[in-house]
Image (cartoon, rainbow, N blue to C red):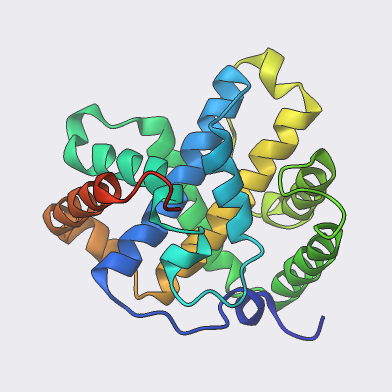
Amino acid sequence: MAALLNEHWLKHAFMKTDRERLIALAGIYQSVYLTQQVARRGVADSEALEASIYSLFQMDAASVEAVYGGLKKISIGLQQLHNQLKSLNKQDIEITRYALSLLQLERKLAKNPAMLQQIGDGITQATVRLEHFPMLHSNILAQLADIYAGTISTMQPRIMVNGDPTHLQNPDNTNKIRALLLAGIRACMLWRQCGGNRFQLILGRRRLIGISQDLLSEIQDLPPNQA
Protein backbone atom coordinates (compact mmCIF):
# COMPACT_ATOMS: atom_id res chain seq x y z
CA MET A 1 0.00 0.00 0.00
CA ALA A 2 1.47 3.30 -1.08
CA ALA A 3 -0.37 5.50 1.38
CA LEU A 4 0.75 5.91 4.96
CA LEU A 5 -1.57 5.04 7.83
CA ASN A 6 -2.62 8.63 8.49
CA GLU A 7 -3.75 8.88 4.85
CA HIS A 8 -5.40 5.45 5.12
CA TRP A 9 -7.42 6.21 8.26
CA LEU A 10 -7.78 9.97 8.06
CA LYS A 11 -9.00 10.38 4.52
CA HIS A 12 -11.54 13.04 5.45
CA ALA A 13 -10.81 16.26 7.31
CA PHE A 14 -13.20 16.06 10.24
CA MET A 15 -14.61 19.17 11.86
CA LYS A 16 -12.57 20.49 14.76
CA THR A 17 -15.49 20.83 17.16
CA ASP A 18 -15.85 19.93 20.82
CA ARG A 19 -18.41 17.28 19.86
CA GLU A 20 -16.06 15.53 17.42
CA ARG A 21 -13.15 15.71 19.86
CA LEU A 22 -15.24 14.30 22.68
CA ILE A 23 -16.50 11.38 20.58
CA ALA A 24 -12.89 10.60 19.63
CA LEU A 25 -11.94 10.71 23.32
CA ALA A 26 -14.83 8.38 24.05
CA GLY A 27 -13.35 6.03 21.46
CA ILE A 28 -10.13 5.95 23.46
CA TYR A 29 -11.96 5.30 26.72
CA GLN A 30 -14.13 2.62 25.16
CA SER A 31 -11.09 0.72 23.94
CA VAL A 32 -9.27 0.88 27.29
CA TYR A 33 -12.39 0.06 29.33
CA LEU A 34 -13.05 -3.00 27.18
CA THR A 35 -9.39 -3.93 27.51
CA GLN A 36 -9.78 -3.83 31.28
CA GLN A 37 -12.93 -5.93 31.12
CA VAL A 38 -11.35 -8.64 28.98
CA ALA A 39 -8.28 -8.72 31.24
CA ARG A 40 -10.30 -8.92 34.47
CA ARG A 41 -13.36 -10.92 33.43
CA GLY A 42 -12.47 -12.59 30.14
CA VAL A 43 -15.50 -11.00 28.44
CA ALA A 44 -16.61 -7.59 27.24
CA ASP A 45 -19.72 -6.04 25.70
CA SER A 46 -19.82 -7.52 22.19
CA GLU A 47 -21.56 -4.54 20.54
CA ALA A 48 -19.05 -2.06 21.95
CA LEU A 49 -16.16 -4.40 21.06
CA GLU A 50 -17.38 -4.68 17.49
CA ALA A 51 -17.74 -0.89 17.22
CA SER A 52 -14.15 -0.36 18.36
CA ILE A 53 -12.82 -2.97 15.93
CA TYR A 54 -15.08 -1.56 13.19
CA SER A 55 -13.33 1.81 13.56
CA LEU A 56 -10.05 0.30 12.37
CA PHE A 57 -11.51 -0.38 8.92
CA GLN A 58 -13.23 2.96 8.28
CA MET A 59 -11.47 5.05 5.64
CA ASP A 60 -14.34 7.10 4.20
CA ALA A 61 -16.39 8.04 7.27
CA ALA A 62 -17.86 11.53 7.08
CA SER A 63 -17.62 12.12 10.84
CA VAL A 64 -16.00 10.71 13.95
CA GLU A 65 -19.40 9.40 15.00
CA ALA A 66 -19.66 7.49 11.72
CA VAL A 67 -16.26 5.89 12.33
CA TYR A 68 -17.96 3.89 15.09
CA GLY A 69 -21.18 3.23 13.20
CA GLY A 70 -23.29 5.70 15.16
CA LEU A 71 -23.42 7.47 18.50
CA LYS A 72 -25.03 4.55 20.33
CA LYS A 73 -22.11 2.31 19.45
CA ILE A 74 -19.76 4.52 21.45
CA SER A 75 -22.07 4.92 24.48
CA ILE A 76 -19.91 2.82 26.81
CA GLY A 77 -16.90 4.97 26.02
CA LEU A 78 -18.92 8.16 26.54
CA GLN A 79 -20.15 6.94 29.92
CA GLN A 80 -16.66 5.96 31.03
CA LEU A 81 -15.23 9.30 29.89
CA HIS A 82 -18.01 11.19 31.64
CA ASN A 83 -17.43 9.27 34.86
CA GLN A 84 -13.68 9.90 34.73
CA LEU A 85 -14.06 13.63 34.07
CA LYS A 86 -16.79 14.17 36.65
CA SER A 87 -15.22 12.31 39.58
CA LEU A 88 -11.52 13.13 39.67
CA ASN A 89 -11.26 11.84 43.24
CA LYS A 90 -12.85 8.53 42.23
CA GLN A 91 -11.15 8.02 38.89
CA ASP A 92 -10.27 4.54 37.74
CA ILE A 93 -6.52 5.14 37.73
CA GLU A 94 -5.86 2.07 35.61
CA ILE A 95 -8.14 3.25 32.79
CA THR A 96 -6.60 6.72 32.95
CA ARG A 97 -3.10 5.21 32.75
CA TYR A 98 -4.00 3.15 29.69
CA ALA A 99 -5.55 6.17 27.96
CA LEU A 100 -2.61 8.48 28.65
CA SER A 101 -0.15 5.81 27.50
CA LEU A 102 -2.04 5.43 24.21
CA LEU A 103 -1.97 9.18 23.65
CA GLN A 104 1.78 9.21 24.27
CA LEU A 105 2.38 6.26 21.97
CA GLU A 106 0.30 7.80 19.18
CA ARG A 107 2.45 10.96 19.25
CA LYS A 108 5.54 8.80 18.77
CA LEU A 109 3.85 6.79 16.04
CA ALA A 110 3.02 9.98 14.12
CA LYS A 111 6.78 10.61 13.79
CA ASN A 112 7.55 7.10 12.51
CA PRO A 113 6.62 6.82 8.79
CA ALA A 114 7.96 3.27 8.47
CA MET A 115 5.74 2.04 11.29
CA LEU A 116 2.75 3.94 9.92
CA GLN A 117 3.35 2.16 6.62
CA GLN A 118 3.58 -1.22 8.35
CA ILE A 119 0.32 -0.71 10.22
CA GLY A 120 -1.43 0.58 7.11
CA ASP A 121 -0.35 -2.47 5.14
CA GLY A 122 -1.57 -4.75 7.91
CA ILE A 123 -4.97 -3.06 8.06
CA THR A 124 -5.31 -3.42 4.30
CA GLN A 125 -4.59 -7.16 4.52
CA ALA A 126 -7.09 -7.54 7.35
CA THR A 127 -9.69 -5.69 5.29
CA VAL A 128 -9.38 -8.35 2.60
CA ARG A 129 -10.05 -11.04 5.20
CA LEU A 130 -13.31 -9.34 6.14
CA GLU A 131 -14.69 -10.62 2.86
CA HIS A 132 -14.52 -14.12 4.36
CA PHE A 133 -14.86 -13.65 8.13
CA PRO A 134 -17.10 -11.56 10.44
CA MET A 135 -15.64 -8.58 12.26
CA LEU A 136 -15.03 -10.38 15.57
CA HIS A 137 -13.83 -13.68 14.12
CA SER A 138 -10.74 -15.04 15.83
CA ASN A 139 -8.79 -14.82 12.55
CA ILE A 140 -9.49 -11.08 12.21
CA LEU A 141 -8.67 -10.36 15.85
CA ALA A 142 -5.47 -12.42 15.62
CA GLN A 143 -4.31 -10.47 12.57
CA LEU A 144 -5.03 -7.13 14.25
CA ALA A 145 -3.23 -8.35 17.37
CA ASP A 146 -0.19 -9.26 15.25
CA ILE A 147 -0.17 -5.73 13.81
CA TYR A 148 -0.14 -4.27 17.32
CA ALA A 149 2.50 -6.70 18.59
CA GLY A 150 4.84 -5.96 15.68
CA THR A 151 4.53 -2.18 15.88
CA ILE A 152 2.97 -0.29 18.81
CA SER A 153 4.06 -2.91 21.35
CA THR A 154 7.71 -2.33 20.44
CA MET A 155 7.58 1.34 21.51
CA GLN A 156 7.94 2.85 24.96
CA PRO A 157 6.09 3.15 27.21
CA ARG A 158 4.78 -0.39 26.76
CA ILE A 159 1.28 -0.79 28.10
CA MET A 160 1.29 -3.43 30.82
CA VAL A 161 -2.27 -4.74 31.13
CA ASN A 162 -3.28 -5.99 34.57
CA GLY A 163 -5.94 -8.62 35.15
CA ASP A 164 -6.74 -12.19 36.06
CA PRO A 165 -3.85 -14.42 34.91
CA THR A 166 -6.34 -17.07 33.82
CA HIS A 167 -7.88 -14.65 31.33
CA LEU A 168 -4.61 -13.02 30.31
CA GLN A 169 -3.07 -16.39 29.43
CA ASN A 170 -5.92 -17.18 27.05
CA PRO A 171 -4.64 -16.46 23.48
CA ASP A 172 -8.06 -15.29 22.31
CA ASN A 173 -8.20 -12.74 25.11
CA THR A 174 -4.67 -11.58 24.37
CA ASN A 175 -5.69 -11.00 20.76
CA LYS A 176 -8.79 -9.05 21.82
CA ILE A 177 -6.73 -6.84 24.12
CA ARG A 178 -4.13 -6.06 21.48
CA ALA A 179 -6.79 -5.39 18.84
CA LEU A 180 -8.57 -3.05 21.27
CA LEU A 181 -5.36 -1.16 22.04
CA LEU A 182 -4.81 -0.75 18.29
CA ALA A 183 -8.34 0.67 18.10
CA GLY A 184 -7.36 3.00 20.93
CA ILE A 185 -4.43 4.27 18.87
CA ARG A 186 -6.83 4.86 15.99
CA ALA A 187 -9.06 6.92 18.34
CA CYS A 188 -6.03 8.94 19.48
CA MET A 189 -5.31 9.80 15.84
CA LEU A 190 -8.93 10.91 15.41
CA TRP A 191 -8.73 13.06 18.53
CA ARG A 192 -5.57 14.77 17.34
CA GLN A 193 -6.98 15.30 13.85
CA CYS A 194 -9.98 17.03 15.41
CA GLY A 195 -7.64 19.44 17.18
CA GLY A 196 -7.35 17.60 20.48
CA ASN A 197 -4.51 18.39 22.87
CA ARG A 198 -3.65 17.86 26.53
CA PHE A 199 -4.48 21.43 27.52
CA GLN A 200 -8.11 20.79 26.62
CA LEU A 201 -8.19 17.85 29.00
CA ILE A 202 -6.74 19.93 31.82
CA LEU A 203 -8.35 23.33 31.25
CA GLY A 204 -11.59 22.36 29.51
CA ARG A 205 -12.78 19.62 31.86
CA ARG A 206 -16.00 21.36 32.89
CA ARG A 207 -16.96 21.98 29.26
CA LEU A 208 -16.20 18.37 28.33
CA ILE A 209 -18.37 17.12 31.19
CA GLY A 210 -21.28 19.19 29.87
CA ILE A 211 -20.86 17.95 26.29
CA SER A 212 -20.54 14.32 27.38
CA GLN A 213 -23.76 14.65 29.38
CA ASP A 214 -25.52 16.16 26.36
CA LEU A 215 -24.35 13.29 24.16
CA LEU A 216 -25.48 10.67 26.69
CA SER A 217 -28.89 12.36 26.82
CA GLU A 218 -28.97 12.39 23.01
CA ILE A 219 -28.36 8.64 22.97
CA GLN A 220 -31.23 8.06 25.40
CA ASP A 221 -33.56 10.00 23.09
CA LEU A 222 -32.66 7.93 20.01
CA PRO A 223 -35.14 5.29 18.81
CA PRO A 224 -34.26 1.79 20.15
CA ASN A 225 -33.47 0.46 16.67
CA GLN A 226 -31.26 3.37 15.62
CA ALA A 227 -27.52 2.60 15.53
User: Where residue 79 appears, x then y in whole percent?
Assistant: 31, 40
On the question of residue 163 being in view, the answer is no
Name the one closer to the observer, 223 or 4: 223
Quadrant the N terminus occupies:
bottom right
Task: From this view, report whether residue 55 is shown above or below residue 114.
Answer: above
Point 66% across, 64% down: residue = 57
The residue that appears at 25% across and 54% down in the rendered structure is: 215
The residue located at (28%, 66%) in the rendering is 19
> Against 115, is 16 above or below?
below
In this rendering, the count of numbered labels is 0
Q: Position of residue 43 (x, y in %)?
A: 60, 24
User: Horizontal and vertical percent for residue 85?
Assistant: 22, 44
Which of 135 and 40 lies nearest the eye of the viewer?
Answer: 135
Within the image, what quadrant is residue 93 found in?
top left
User: Is 17 displayed left or right of 86 in the figure?
Assistant: right
- In this image, 221 relative to 95: left or right? left
